[in-house]
Amino acid sequence: MKRPLTHKIRVVVVDDSIVSRAWISNALTTDPSFEIVAVATNARLAWEIVQGQSPQLLILNVDSPQLDGLALLEKVMKRFPTRTLAVGGTSGNASGVAQKALSLGAVDVISPADFLPGQKLPEDTLGLLGRIHSAARGRLQMSFSGKQHVRLPNVILAIAASTGGPDALQLVLSKLPANIPPTLVVQHMPAFFTRGFAKRLNAECAFEVREAREGDALQDGVALIAPGDFHMTVEKSFDRYRVSLNQAPLLHGVRPAADPLFESVARHFGSRAIGVVLTGMGRDGANGLLQMRKAGSFNIAQDQESSVVFGMPREAIAGGAVQIVSPLGKIASVIMAEVARRTVAKVG
């Protein structure tokens, strides 16, 4: 039996001290459960990285006056709440800095004095890694600044396709504007093929298209493609919605499957969702799309004439899961008309 793969913990290190930055980075590289996605030496770059990379753990120097890590921590916790391990404790107000970092939402605070003096000792590396692992599993704390509320997008778009899907998706997505709502796509495709497919779509579209990563935040103007061999769902994380990937058993003989995505969209977004099922073999997506409709979504199916294989759309239509059946060439305009209608309705 195939064992599920464990996703690496995606880490961003922010520190303007070359010594502690190198020591933390070197420790992380000895542990295969971590992936350093970026290293930053100033707050401006760090802020851009956090927005673009959606790390699962931020290791942040809060002690340096040049870096102003406390201000960055406050900004991150308000806008993109992220588990943060604060590094501080060498200043004259070490206790105050640590307490402030914790009050802003840091999971833990470590002092460079705890690990730098013995940096040649393996046990020091293990001790540091233990603290980092604990922080990565720690509970996100509420910021002292007040209650945080989950921000729901006005609209979310979820699309599924199988046989004939790559060309169909390219046609639909390339007709959508740059300001699309958060978009999630399941295309039945083997592992290692989805990344190249996402790059191909990215070159053709007015918005960013990329393969989804564990913990990616849903964003306007970004379409995320489920990676091959992983089911993709949406989960609530503090005041953001993020992608969750798993290797639960194959569903309808495939992984990724559309039903897990559609079911999670139904749970979290209800009437704010638009579902689309394109050409494909089998019945994947029919059950999840029906759950979406029952929750108030607007669903579209590709018509038989323009489908390479009419299996998935036919099953969704037969089950009463869709409101409109459309030729492939008109689906993009149907999507945008519904996005506009629902956006106006929310504003009004």
Image (spheres, grey):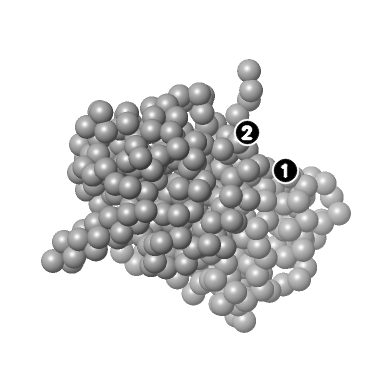
Tell me the number on the disc at residue 32: 1
Sort mark 1 into few (<14), some (14-19) or many (20+) by Cα contacts within 10 Å. few
Give the image quarter of residue 159. top left
**Quadrant that contains the N terminus:** top right
Q: Nearer the viewer, residue 174 or 131?
A: 174
For mark 1, give the secondary structure. Answer: loop
Q: What percent of the width, then of the height, locates residue 230?
A: 54, 36
Amino acid beneath label 1? Pro
Sort mark 2 into few (<14), some (14-19) or many (20+) by Cα contacts within 10 Å. few
Q: Label 2, label 1: how many angstroms apart (C-alpha)?
A: 12 Å
Tag in front: 2 or 1? 2
Q: Residue furthest bottom?
A: 66
Q: Residue furthest left?
A: 348
Tell me the number on the disc at residue 300: none
Q: What percent of the width, then of the height, locates residue 16?
A: 68, 74
Q: Residue at x 32, y 31 (%)?
A: 314
Q: Is residue 311 visible?
A: yes
Q: What percent of the width, then of the height, locates residue 191?
A: 62, 38
Amino acid beneath label 2? Leu
The correct choice, above or below, for 314 with respect to 277 in the image is above
Q: Residue at x 82, y 56 (%)?
A: 118
Tell me the number on the disc at residue 5: 2
